[in-house]
């Protein structure tokens, strides 16, 4: 048996996704996030990059003649485009002239910078060294950064077993307002919000007198969504202020 305590027509929540999983979390969630710098996925894009000149190699899908390893720090301050007549690609050699990006690298533990030549066809993941080390609540993250920004969950909400993944890039999508009702189990003083999209059928028993209840800590927990449900919620109107007073 459940008691229904009231209706809330607009509760602020945030839509997030990562690695094919979809989540919705309320603004009362107490986990903390750190912004992730935008990744660059090829040497060709490094040539067009106008942001930070110092980047970390996260992936290297092609090891060029001048070996580049994961963890190396590239300095593009004096980058320039040049040509190289011979590069190594696995066990094969390419004698044709190719374009290369000339820059320097610093390997972990190295005492000095080393010149490197990166072929423009090289793929990889390059990431600027993070400057913003602020830990954001989900509400502040949405207020400071635009939609589509990526964050890493640094500190899960300690009040319950958090289902949001750590050490993974999480994309912050929309802020929505969702109608809910407040319910509790009969004879229980801890209540929770139940979205009106919940597929549930109830039969009326009796009108109850008002009783004081408190929100359970689990009321702030993330909810995992199917892709279909996520897209339905994402299609709503999102013209809202993100500051939740």
Image (cartoon, grey):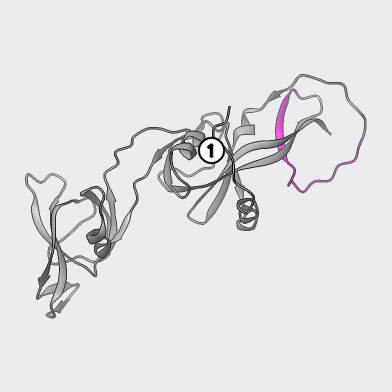
Quadrant position of the N terminus in the picture: top right
Q: Residue 25's image quarter?
A: top right
Q: How crowded is the residue under tag 1: few (<14 C-alpha within 10 Å), some, or many (20+)?
A: some
Q: Nearer the viewer, residue 117 or 213?
A: 117
User: Percent from the top left, x then y, of residue 3?
Assistant: 82, 30
Q: Is residue 130 left or right of residue 151?
A: left
Q: Which of 68 and 229 is in front in this view?
A: 229
In the image, residue 243 above or below residue 174: above
Residue at the spot of label 1: 162
Q: Residue 204's image quarter?
A: top right
One can see residue 108 in this view:
yes
In the image, residue 158 above or below residue 196: above
Q: Is residue 94 left or right of residue 136?
A: left
Magenta residues: mostly which secondary structure?
loop
The structure residue drawn at horizontal position 90% and vertical position 40%, both measured from the top left corner, is 203
Q: Report helix, strand or loop for mark 1.
A: loop
Residue 196 lies in magenta, yes or no? yes
Write down the region rendered in magenta: 189-204
In the image, residue 190 above or below residue 199: above
> Residue extending furthest left?
112
Q: Which of 6 and 215 is in front in this view?
A: 6
Quadrant position of the C terminus in the picture: top right
Q: Is residue 211 left or right of residue 75?
A: right
User: Percent from the top left, x then y, of residue 83?
Assistant: 11, 71
User: Percent from the top left, x then y, of residue 9?
Assistant: 72, 37
> Residue extending furthest bottom?
96
């Amino acid at each position: 048996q459940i008691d229904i305590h009231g209706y809330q027509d607009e509760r602020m929540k945030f839509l997030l996704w990562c690695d094919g999983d979809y989540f919705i979390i309320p603004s009362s969630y107490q986990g903390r996030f750190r912004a992730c710098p935008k990744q660059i996925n090829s040497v060709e894009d490094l040539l067009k990059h106008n942001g930070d000149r110092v980047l970390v190699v996260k992936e290297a899908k092609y090891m060029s003649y001048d070996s580049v390893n994961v963890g190396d720090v590239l300095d593009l301050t004096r980058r320039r485009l040049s040509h190289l007549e011979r590069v190594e690609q696995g066990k094969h050699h390419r004698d044709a002239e190719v374009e290369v990006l000339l820059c320097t690298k610093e390997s972990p533990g190295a005492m000095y910078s080393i010149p490197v030549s990166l072929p423009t066809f090289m793929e990889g993941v390059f990431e600027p060294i993070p400057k913003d080390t602020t830990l954001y609540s989900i509400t502040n993250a949405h207020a400071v950064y635009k939609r589509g920004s990526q964050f890493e969950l640094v500190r899960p909400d300690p009040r319950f077993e958090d289902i949001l993944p750590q050490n993974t890039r999480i994309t912050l999508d929309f802020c929505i307002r969702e109608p809910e009702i407040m319910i509790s189990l009969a004879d229980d003083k801890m209540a929770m919000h139940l979205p009106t999209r919940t597929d549930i059928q109830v039969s009326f028993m009796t009108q109850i007198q008002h009783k004081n209840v408190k929100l359970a800590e689990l009321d702030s927990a993330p909810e995992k969504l199917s892709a279909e449900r996520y897209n339905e919620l994402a299609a709503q109107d999102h013209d809202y202020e993100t500051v939740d007073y």
